[in-house]
């Protein structure tokens, strides 16, 4: 009996770690969606790019991890700015499908570039945190998992504070709420759009570095960008808080489904369970847990 | 409009091929297409056959996304369902080709209606995500329902047989697929001259307004989904019969993205554009492969990087089209025609 409970708790803790990484990616995703109404399919590639940049610095240039981490953030910030300026701004006012297609093409582009530069083999980070399991509250948890969880939580909290108190954060929230109102308040919307992409890239790259530390880096990291859809739909596409809650729920649920159903259905349940949940949510409550219900009029 | 062409009856105005010149050019093109297999290698025929199959699937996607405005990122799932149902029907139920082909299409329609159901409540981005989920769930089912689909080893399909005539090589298949591609293009083109087609376009332009003037959204959205998935199912089924073996790798999200790219580069809401888009997106990677073989001696690594380079060019093509020619090849074709119409006195 206790074995069962330990197994369940173990699944929940690993799910929590995964969920906190999802939360970072989902945060970036919702940020872009809220302020620019663009559904970004290249979020996973942003994550992968961050992981690779950090990897190159720590392994090939032997820069201490903390510095390479900071440099990666700057890189991602610039990348986000460039992407917005070069690809997304010309698409302002185009139909939804065109904008979606641009981000899909962008994701293929980045994935191909990464493949050309770094190949397809899994790259392993030098151990920054140990993989040794430590005994924590009656459970065995890898140290790296614990640090990742703490780190992701800190990042989410920091961004929460940024949106609540900094003037740039406030401006972004106004823009998300109503672009016209924001403009009359003297906010430069174009700058906000660029900032949204830049911050989103930064947040995702943090997620990428954390995941890279846990599992190593390869092309499969990009799938995270698609896994984020169930999270944000569950939380509500236009709610940052919802995205975080949704991500953690999905992370835990995915692990539990995988842990209990894999032996019955023969593997791979982890990959598909969030999407089954997504369909169910869309059928029952399309605007998610915390999303705004859209009322349309002519 | 060509000069000197004055319609006095609606019937002539509604014609697809309006002038004698257009009709004769189309006839000449048709003749050339019919005679093509006599002169070219089987590799070219293979490329042509692929194009025909993709035309069928892409027209299905354009009916849904281009004409009805329902974004689908899960078209590959319907293609997969068509292919696998046909395979199951021929191998497990030993049905003949002429039953298994529409059977695959109909199975696809059933799933298509099911996936289309959320479209009644959600739209735009939410629907896109719902179809994406359908894609992943189908992928999973195909890989893991091993008793039905053989999992990752794939399924074998026999060459189609029609009243004792076996389609077993590229040139025989060429005519079979050509027939289906022309049928798909003509039904697609004619669909939008009917009440149904106009209703679908009204749903795209403003669904609430369409509902107000008496177009049942329930009926027409589901109709669009069923039509689109029927085309997809037929395309998948034909693909299975053509390649004789189907594996799950062919039907991933990459296929859905390919289809979307074809439709968008060709031009949303244009049947002719779809044909152009398919030809462009099929020939481009083939040209790259040929180029990489030619360049193999100069750049040794080029073959190992080929898939990445293909992805790169593919993505660049989409981005450049969307930035500089959002209406796609159909628009370019229209401009070229307009230029030559009054040439050399275009003022």
Image (cartoon, rainbow, N blue to C red):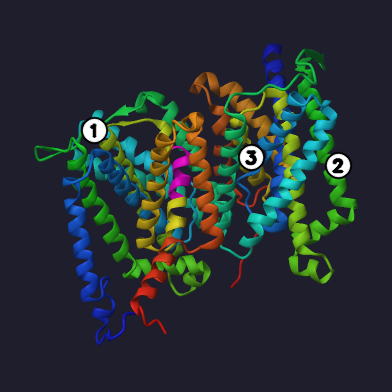
Q: Which mark is residue B90?
A: 1
Q: Main secondary structure of the magenta part?
A: helix
Dot 1 lies on which element? helix
Do the residues at discs 1 and 2 belong to one chain?
Answer: no
Residue A28, image x, y percentages:
72, 45
Q: Residue beneath label 3, please?
A: A45
Residue found farthest to the left: B164
Q: Quadrant of residue B50?
A: top left
Residue A145 visible, this angle = yes
Q: Residue at x 48, y 35 (%)?
A: B307
Query: Disc 2 designates what residue?
Result: A158
The span picked out in magenta is B252-260
Viewer-closest of A222 and A124: A124
Labels 1 and 3 in the same subunit: no
At a point 70% along the width and 27% down the height, the residue shown is A212
- Between the residue at mark 2 and the residue at mark 3, the CA separation in whole angstroms equals 23 Å
The location of residue B204, given as percent across then percent down, is 48, 65
**B82 to the left or right of A267:** left
**The N terminus of chain B sits in image quarter:** bottom left
Label 3 is found on which chain of the structure?
Answer: A
* Mark 1 chain: B
Q: Is residue B179 above or below residue B89?
A: below
């Amino acid at each position: 009996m206790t074995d069962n409970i330990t197994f369940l708790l173990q699944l929940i803790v690993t799910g929590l770690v995964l969920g906190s990484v999802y939360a970072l990616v989902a945060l970036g995703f919702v940020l872009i969606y809220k302020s620019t109404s663009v559904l970004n399919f290249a979020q996973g590639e942003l994550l992968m790019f961050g992981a690779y940049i950090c990897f190159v610095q720590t392994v090939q240039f032997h820069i201490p991890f903390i510095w390479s981490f900071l440099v990666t953030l700057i890189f991602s910030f610039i990348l986000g700015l460039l992407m917005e300026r070069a690809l997304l701004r010309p698409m302002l006012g185009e139909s939804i499908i065109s904008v979606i297609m641009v981000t899909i093409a962008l994701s293929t582009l980045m994935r191909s570039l990464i493949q050309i530069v770094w190949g397809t083999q899994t790259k392993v980070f030098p151990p920054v945190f140990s993989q040794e399991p430590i005994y924590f509250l009656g459970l065995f948890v890898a140290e790296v998992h614990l640090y990742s969880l703490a780190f992701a939580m800190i990042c989410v909290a920091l961004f929460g504070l940024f949106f609540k108190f900094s003037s740039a954060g406030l401006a972004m929230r106004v823009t998300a709420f109503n672009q016209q109102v924001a403009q009359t308040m003297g906010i430069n919307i174009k700058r906000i759009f660029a900032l949204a992409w830049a911050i989103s890239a930064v947040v995702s790259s943090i997620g990428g570095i954390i995941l890279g530390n846990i599992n190593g880096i390869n092309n499969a990291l990009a799938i995270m960008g698609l896994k984020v859809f169930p999270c944000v739909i569950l939380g509500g596409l236009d709610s940052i808080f919802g995205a975080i809650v949704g991500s953690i729920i999905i992370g835990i649920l995915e692990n539990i489904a995988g842990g209990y159903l894999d032996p019955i259905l023969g593997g791979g349940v982890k990959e598909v369970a969030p999407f089954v949940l997504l369909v169910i949510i869309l059928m029952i409550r399309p605007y998610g847990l915390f999303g705004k219900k859209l009322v349309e009029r002519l | 409009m060509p000069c000197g062409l004055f319609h006095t009856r609606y019937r002539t105005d509604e014609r697809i091929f309006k002038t004698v010149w257009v009709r004769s050019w189309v006839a000449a093109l048709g003749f050339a297409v019919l005679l093509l297999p006599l002169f070219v290698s089987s590799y070219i025929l293979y490329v042509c056959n692929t194009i025909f199959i993709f035309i069928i699937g892409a027209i299905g996607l354009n009916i849904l996304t281009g004409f009805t405005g329902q974004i689908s990122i899960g078209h590959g799932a319907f293609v997969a369902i068509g292919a696998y149902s046909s395979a199951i029907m021929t191998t497990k139920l030993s049905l003949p080709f002429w039953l298994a082909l529409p059977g695959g299409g109909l199975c696809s329609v059933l799933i298509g209606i099911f996936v289309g159901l959320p479209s009644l409540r959600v739209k735009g981005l939410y629907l896109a995500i719902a179809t994406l989920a359908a894609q992943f769930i189908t992928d999973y089912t195909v890989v893991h329902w091993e008793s039905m689909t053989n999992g990752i080893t794939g399924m074998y399909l026999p060459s189609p047989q029609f009243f004792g005539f076996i389609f077993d090589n590229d040139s025989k298949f060429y005519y079979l697929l050509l027939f289906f591609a022309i049928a798909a293009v003509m039904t697609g083109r004619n669909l939008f001259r009917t009440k149904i087609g106009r209703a679908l376009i009204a749903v795209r332009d403003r669904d609430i307004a369409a509902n107000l003037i008496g177009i049942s959204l329930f009926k027409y959205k589901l109709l669009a989904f069923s039509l689109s998935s029927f085309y997809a199912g037929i395309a998948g089924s034909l693909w299975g019969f053509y390649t004789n073996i189907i594996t799950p790798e062919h039907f991933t999200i990459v296929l859905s993205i390919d289809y979307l790219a074809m439709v968008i580069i060709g031009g949303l809401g244009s049947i002719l554009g779809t044909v152009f888009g398919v030809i462009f997106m099929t020939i481009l990677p083939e040209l790259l492969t040929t180029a990489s073989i030619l360049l193999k001696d100069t750049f040794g690594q080029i073959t190992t990087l080929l898939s990445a380079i293909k992805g790169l060019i593919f993505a660049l093509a989409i981005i450049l089209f969307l930035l500089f020619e959002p209406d796609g090849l159909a628009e370019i074709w229209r401009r070229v025609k307009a230029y030559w119409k009054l040439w050399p006195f275009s003022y």
